Amino acid sequence: MTATIQRFRPGASSEEVAKALRDDGVAIIEELAPAELCDRVAAELAPHIAETKTGNDGFEGAHTKRPGALLRRSPSSVEMVAHDLILEVADQVLWPAKTTFQIHLTQAICLGPGQTAQALHRDQWAFDFFEFPAEMEVEVSTIWALTDFTEENGATRVAPGMGHLVDSDVGSVTHSDTVPAEMPRGSVVLYTGRTIHGGGANTTGVDRVGVNVDYVLGWLRQEENQYLSIPRDVAAELPEKVQRLMGYQMGAYALGYMDDLRDPIGFLRDGPSGDERRSFAPEK
């Protein structure tokens, strides 16, 4: 029998949600984003979704659009990207626990009518299909629902509790091993980088729209290059917590400094010629 997805309300503790992620690889927090926030984000993203081309291949989706650079295109998305509960969960699930973590990517996903189901995969395959040790969790992914997610409109399908499979076994996982992450607007599904999942098929006549934000250990390369996607003048106006999430911090001891041993956060504060120097000790 296929497992179900554990569900939580906004008042849940980060420890509860983190345990579900460690146990099953997936969890849903229902209606974490208020309707007003969803309205703002949807309005800001609408013109970018409209002008974005659909995918280049079957995996990206012939009827799916994926505009990125959300911190530039949707100022309100900061409230999702840096939501305290999400960051607390990521901090507990990502391992090794004493390192930093950062944004891996930000994108809207607009899955249009007629989109077929996406091939099942693991997000951490982005690291050149490297098979990380089974005890390591290098990535936490989130998808916020800007529309209701239903099985009919292509809710993300996940295979709870199957993260123990080695990469060579993933091909044996079938549609019947997965369940749809159905959830009302404003909810968020979280899953780890090793969780087997894929977008569902949209058999309705309307778009399924979500906000996808992934987090990864601070010493791994980001999938979306935040430094090029978000201009410096935009990044400089963001809260410091978000700047650090973007990668303007040390990834580990002596990892990621700039020029004369400066912490990269100084680049935003002082500019390229500033003289701010900081400890190599990473900040969370």
Image: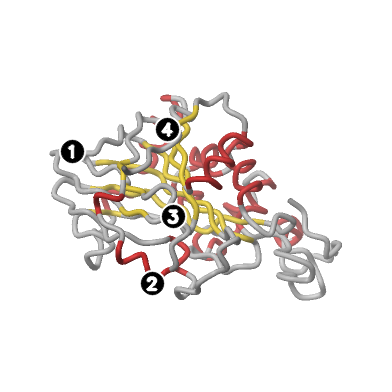
User: CA–CA distance between discs 3 and 2?
Assistant: 14 Å
Label 4 Cα crowd, 10 Å radius (few <14 / some 14-19 / many 20+): many
Give whichever of discs 4 and 1 has the lower sequence position: 4
Say which of marks 1 and 2 sits in front.
2
Residue at horizontal 50 percent and vertical 74 percent from the top: 130
Q: Which residue is mark 1?
A: 206
- Residue 174 shows which numbered tag? none
* Quadrant of image for the N terminus: top left
Residue at horizontal 60 percent and vertical 61 percent from the top: 136
User: CA–CA distance between discs 3 and 4?
Assistant: 19 Å
Give whichever of discs 1 and 3 has the lower sequence position: 3
Q: Position of residue 46 (x, y in %)?
A: 32, 42
Say which of marks 4 and 2 sits in front.
2
- Residue 195 shows which numbered tag? 3
Q: Which residue is mark 4?
A: 187
Q: Which residue is mark 2?
A: 168
What is the three-letter code of the residue carrying label 2? Ser
Give whichever of discs 3 and 4 has the lower sequence position: 4
User: CA–CA distance between discs 1 and 3?
Assistant: 27 Å
Question: Can residue 181 be seen by looking at this rendering?
Answer: yes
Front position in the image: 247 or 139: 139
Establish if 179 lies above or below 11.
Answer: below
Front position in the image: 245 or 132: 132
Residue at horizontal 31 percent and vertical 48 percent from the top: 178
Label 2 Cα crowd, 10 Å radius (few <14 / some 14-19 / many 20+): few
In terms of secondary structure, where does tag 3 sit? loop
Q: Position of residue 210 (x, y in %)?
A: 36, 42
Label 1 Cα crowd, 10 Å radius (few <14 / some 14-19 / many 20+): few
Establish if 254 lies above or below 26.
Answer: below
